[in-house]
Amino acid sequence: LHASVGVAFAVGSGPATAETLLRDADLAMYGAKNRGKGRVAVFDDSMHEGAFERLELKADLARAVERNELLLHYQPVIDLAQGTIAGFEALMRWNHRVRGMVGPGTFIPLAEETGLIVPIGRWLMDVALDQLRRWQDLLPDSALSMSINVSGRQLEDEGVVDDLRAAIERSGVDPSSVVVELTESVVVDDSPELVARL
């Protein structure tokens, strides 16, 4: 067992109420958790700003797909022996209407935390496989593949297999040209449901 502890002190300007102390200690605890297990964090005022920014980003992320703010970048996968492009990895990016480009290290954890990674992942599958189909049509003699990252949170969703199957059928690509990449945390969790979905 591990414990993450958030500490807030009833000192400084203005009287502290039980409610504000609990809120501040809670923010500090999440700060401790973000740095790893078995940590202690002491509340400071910058944590309020970070919490407010996270709330804003969560709200904006919920509308990012309908606003067409999400986009995919494609990183080529090179066959070194042949010196040719063997495929691509789809990398999600967020071009926020006010903040500009928001890094995946910022918005992917938020998407997983809120469950938005499931509909966003569905969108990624459709867009990436549609793009793969267009490249395969342009280069019919190639055996291009598309790598798609699937998070543990997506695998927890019972519809993930159907989502991937539907995206493959809509795009018309051969299923063997789709590579599903998993994070290490998924491999560690050997729950029967996740194994069945894999």
Image (tube, rainbow, N blue to C red):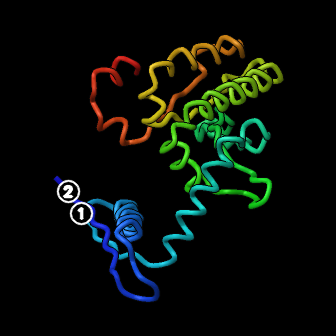
Q: For the residues marked 2 and 1, what is the alpha-carbon distance in whole angstroms?
A: 5 Å
The answer to whether residue 35 is visible is no
Q: Position of residue 90 (x, y in %)?
A: 64, 38
- Number of labels in the image equals 2
The disc placed on residue 38 is 1
- Residue at x-position 46% and y-position 85%: 14
- Residue at x-position 64% and y-position 48%: 59
Disc 1, SS: loop
- Residue at x-position 53% and y-position 63%: 51
Asked if residue 61 is positioned above or below residue 162 in the image, the reply reads below
The amino acid type of the residue labelled 1 equals Gly
Asked if residue 77 is positioned above or below residue 3 in the image, the reply reads above
The answer to whether residue 188 is visible is yes
Q: Position of residue 65 (x, y in %)?
A: 72, 37
The disc placed on residue 113 is none
Tell which of 27 and 70 is nearer to you: 27
The amino acid type of the residue labelled 2 equals His
Asked if residue 58 is positioned above or below residue 19 in the image, the reply reads above
User: Mark 2 or mark 1, which has the lower sequence index?
Assistant: 2
Residue furthest right in the image: 138
- Residue at x-position 80% and y-position 54%: 97
Query: Badge 2, how many Cα within 10 Å: few under 14, some, many 20+?
Result: few
Q: Position of residue 19 (x, y in %)?
A: 39, 65
Tell which of 121 and 84 is nearer to you: 121
Q: Which residue position holds label 2?
A: 2
* Quadrant for the C terminus in the image: top left
Q: Are marks 2 and 1 in contact (CB under 8 Å)?
A: yes
